[in-house]
Amino acid sequence: MTDDAFITYRGLLFSVAYEMLGSAADAEDVVQETWLRWADMGDAARAGVRDPRAYLIRIVSRQALNRLRTLARQREDYVGEWLPEPLLTSPDVAEDVEFAESVSIAMLAVLETLGPTERAVFVLREGCSTCRTTRSPRLWANPPQQSGRPRTGRESTWPRAARGWR
Amino acid sequence: MAARRARMAVSRAEQQQVVERFIAALTTGDVQGLMDVLAPDVVVVGDGGGLAPTVRHPVTGRELVVSYLSCFSRFAPDAKVDTLLLNGAVAARIDPAGELDTAIAFVVEDGRIARIYAIRNPHKLGRLDAVAELQR
């Protein structure tokens, strides 16, 4: 019974990881790592988690961010343009306009132009719309200041990239 | 944000209709049909990953894109092109020899195609036979 919450949110965790990474294979690895963490906690610790959904999103985001930093270096050497790995989706996803937008190839292609941390912020705050309702995921030792956007010197490009995805 | 959402809210029926018009023009080499279905500032982005030939850099502008795409029916006269739902939108797959070769995603705007993403890297085409467990 230890993985009940994990199974419940597996699809959501995969979606967050996929939006972060643009790669289903990497997203699956990250979800697997998340499961290992969750299983390793022990029954008592798991029972003490008040909001398993938020907690699991936090783990998967951290794991995805680590993976993204590694991938970002590899993708610098990619031959030609890099596009996300497409996924076959159910009609339900297409009917949900906001969700369809956040997983669209166009959106994932734009997210690829952001730095790893910027991308994590964007996915958790704007892309993954249901994550916004959870308590702010503490991904960073120093939480981003008032606007929630990291000041990385690319700030001026940030909203433009996000809006100019088409 | 609101403007972006509004632009995106193209119904699936409209996406389907536009993509089917595109496929019909592409497979028959119909230059005028391609001109009609593409936006003037259409962009084609291709990803071959160094493993499959594609446009190395994005191709911008309808004339250039049409001249590029109008050869398709001559190079692959028997290619099967079908629509499917990829990443929540109407997309296309090309199967020239009964085998998946290219996945194409689109951005549809005002009844025309504004962007074409052609994914040809074979490592990225392995998951189009089973529906992904995306969930929000």
Image (cartoon, coloured by chain):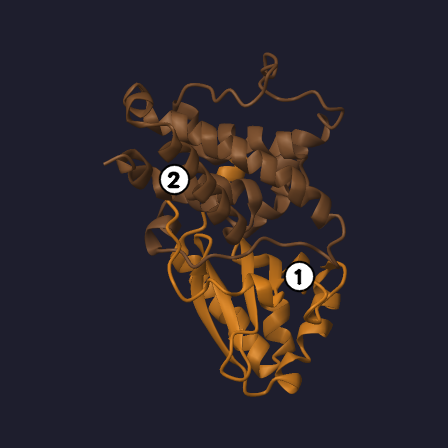
Chain colours: A brown, B orange
Q: In the picture shown, does residue A92 fall above or below A122?
A: below
Q: Disc number at residue B47?
A: 1
Three-letter code, disc 2 = Leu
State which chain disc 2 sits on. Answer: A
Rendered location of residue B120, percent (x, y): 62, 67
**Separation of marks 1 and 2 at Cα, in angstroms:** 27 Å
Rendered location of residue A41, percent (x, y): 37, 28
Residue toward you, B33 or A38: A38
Q: In the picture shown, does residue A48 fall above or below A130?
A: above
Rendered location of residue B40, percent (x, y): 68, 58
Q: In the picture shown, does residue B37 fall above or below B114?
A: below
Picture residue at 56% right of the left edge, 48% below the top:
A22
Q: Is residue B7 visible?
A: no
Look at the numbered disc 1 and give the secondary structure of its residue: strand
Picture residue at 56% right of the left edge, 76% below the top:
B25
Q: Rate crowding at label 2 as few (under 14), some (14 to 19) or many (20 or more) other CA atoms within 10 Å.
A: many
Q: Disc number at residue A52?
A: none
Residue toward you, B75 or B30: B75
Q: Quadrant of the N terminus of chain A?
A: top left
Three-letter code, disc 1 = Asp
Rendered location of residue A145, percent (x, y): 61, 13
Picture residue at 58% right of the left edge, 63% below the top:
B123
Q: Rate crowding at label 1 as few (under 14), some (14 to 19) or many (20 or more) other CA atoms within 10 Å.
A: many
Which quadrant of the structure image shows residue A119? top right
Look at the numbered disc 2 and give the secondary structure of its residue: helix
Picture residue at 72% right of the left edge, 44% below the top:
A73
Q: Is residue A150 visible?
A: yes
Q: Are marks 1 and 2 on the same chain?
A: no
State which chain disc 1 sits on. Answer: B
Q: Which residue is mark 2?
A: A12
